[in-house]
Amino acid sequence: MGRSPCCDKAGLKKGPWTPEEDQKLLAYIEEHGHGSWRSLPEKAGLQRCGKSCRLRWTNYLRPDIKRGKFTVQEEQTIIQLHALLGNRWSAIATHLAKRTDNEIKNYWNTHLKKRLVKMGIDPVTHKHKNETLMSSTGQSKSAAATLSHMAQWESARLEAEARLARESKLLHYQNNKAAAPNNCLSHKASSTNWTKPNQGKGDQQLESPTSTVTFSENLHLMIMPSGENNNESSEIQNMTEFALSSSTSSDVKDSDHDWMRQINCPAEGIEEGFTSLLLLGDSGDRSLSIGKKDEETVAGAVEVNESDYSYYEDNKNYWNSILNLVDSTPSDSSTMF
DNA sequence: AATACTCCCAACCGCCAGAGA
DNA sequence: ATCTCTGGCGGTTGGGAGTAT
């Protein structure tokens, strides 16, 4: 079939956006919502393709975008989620309020990846070089298989969660549209129109378009996705509460921004950072949350043998670690490691 | 001050999936 | 069933800013 590029029209502008163009785009979306991106440029008086407008909006102009330095917590969240999900930036972005997938991707490529490499950690596998050497052992293979399985499970869960978030926002949007037109939400993946923002000031600041669900909530969603497997609910509930109530392990000041240094400090027991956890303790609490029935329902789930389940039962550190990272507020960066 | 080099990130590109005709 | 359109995603890059020589 082939598809013509969206910007094949001659005369369409490319490259950096000017303040005037930004203003036009903002003004138009404030007035009308974005509607069809393809038709937007003409209506808004822009010599741009719709795709360019959409990207400019979602990555830069949207009022609910947090810009500037990533916090220690955000960095750790990115790394942990990357270990789980790989380069699925949009999925990762759903757990980082007000950050765009593009920004996260850039930050990973320019900062975090290099840092991991410097530490001798493979940014793709998140394995330390030493661990890689051990990878031929049976246990490591099994652990790797388990990790792979968990990642797939996690991916499916995140997708479902993102869908839920979108749908709930759509509902929220629809419910509030008439009553409070200025309080509507947009979503990066939403097909709903964005309406006039309040420019992110004060208490009425817009929520993140990428995730309005806290990680605590997410955990519940992940653990109890559909209410279909309630036969495990009490155990799940216990695990959830255990995880959510886990205390943090040590204080890290924001000024100690080079948290990676600490991972290399065995004396503080931090060498079991998430990367190690993923390698060695990848059993994770989620084991207790997934019955085989659930496993079968996860699209693309790999086959899991009995021995894999034993991994699931041993180590609570994995979820604790992730929870400690993601379940605290961005302003509280003292809870990491 | 001039030049070379590196870093960073906004923006582009190409592919894919889903919806609708 | 097939094709087209649209929006979303991840990979890549161009060029400005900053730094080193």
Image (cartoon, coloured by chain):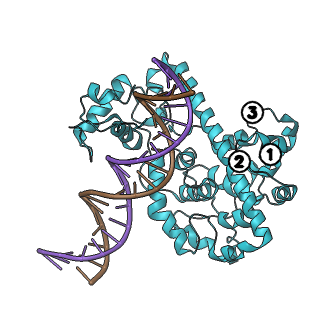
Chain colours: A cyan, B purple, C brown
Q: Are marks 1 and 3 on the same chain?
A: yes
Residue A69 bears which disc, if any? none
Could you tell me which secondary element the residue under label 1 belongs to? loop
Q: Is residue A312 above or below residue A24?
A: below
Pick out the residue farthest to the top.
A178
Packing grade of label 3 (10 A; few <14, some 14-19, many >=20) is: few
Packing grade of label 1 (10 A; few <14, some 14-19, many >=20) is: many
Comparing A153 with A303, the one in front is A303
The mark that comes first in sequence, 3 or 2, is: 2
Could you tell me which secondary element the residue under label 2 belongs to? helix
Distance between the alpha carbons at the discs numbered 3 and 2: 15 Å
Specify the subunit that label 1 lies on.
A
In the rendered view, does C20 fall on the left or right side of A306?
A: left
Could you tell me which secondary element the residue under label 3 belongs to? loop
Residue drawn at 84 percent across, 35 percent down: A230
The mark that comes first in sequence, 1 or 3, is: 3
Q: Which residue is mark 3?
A: A226
User: Mark 2 and mark 1 in contact (Cβ < 8 Å)?
Assistant: yes
Asked where in the image residue A119 lies, by quadrant, the reply is: bottom right
Q: Position of residue A156 (x, y in %)?
A: 67, 43
Residue drawn at 31 percent across, 36 percent down: A49
Comparing A278 with A182, the one in front is A278
Q: Which residue is mark 2?
A: A153
Q: Position of residue A279 (x, y in %)?
A: 71, 66
Asked where in the image residue A73 lies, by quadrant, the reply is: bottom right
Specify the subunit that label 3 lies on.
A
In the rendered view, does A161 fall on the left or right side of C8?
A: right
Residue A290 bears which disc, if any? 1
